[in-house]
Image (tube, rainbow, N blue to C red):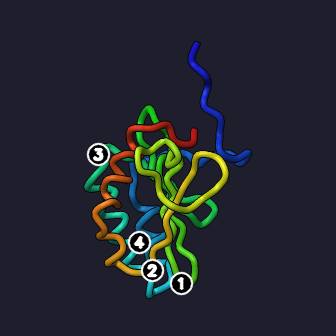
Amino acid sequence: MAMERKATTTRKPPVPSPSHDEIDDWMRRAMPDLQPIVARLDELIRETLPDLQYAVKWKKAYYWVEEQGWVIELVAYDVSVNIVFHGGADFDTPPPLGDTGRSLYIKLTSVDEVEQPQMREWIENAARVPGWT
């Protein structure tokens, strides 16, 4: 008997939408220095994962993959952007940060960091493991 996935939080998850408009608005509201980082991350996520759905909730951008749930979350702080992989603990090479549950993340402060080779691999892995539902 398969085990049911448990949410990574007690908060109610966002509602997926095929429209990217909320994400566009969220990116425009990020700190000006971080806008190129969130824009490049968003572009890379959409290039790498087909048929995404989107949401913005709690000032965070979410990316939904059918059958897996919410797999990626972007959070723009004052000086960095965190990309959270909700199933990151299940990756062959997991992201380095995070110590509770299955969600792991990396912290980015430049567009150059987005271009590291492992970023695309982590994004691809996000679609292969259960996320937050």
Residue 122: x %, y % from top left: 38, 53
Q: Earlier in the sequence, mark 4 or mark 1?
A: 4
- Read off the residue under disc 1: 79
On the rendered structure, is 10 left or right of 106? right
Q: Of label 2 and label 4, which has the lower sequence position?
A: 4
Inter-mark Cα distance, 4 to 1: 12 Å
Residue beneath label 2, please?
A: 109
On screen, residue 63 above or below 23: above
Asked whether the residues under the numbered discs 1 and 2 touch, taking CB atoms below 8 Å apart as contact, a structural biologist would say yes
For this orientation, the residue located farthest to the right is: 10
Q: Quadrant of the N terminus?
A: top right
Type of amino acid at the residue the image marks with label 2: Thr
Nearest-to-viewer mark from 2 and 4: 2
Residue depth check, mark 4 versus mark 1: number of the one nearer the observer: 1
Mark 1 crowd level (few <14, some 14–19, many ≥20, 10 Å Cα):
few
- Dot 1 amino acid type: Val
The secondary element bearing badge 4 is classed as helix
Question: Upstream in the sequence, badge 1 or badge 3?
Answer: 3
Q: Under tag 2, what secondary structure? A: loop
Residue type at numbered disc 3: Pro
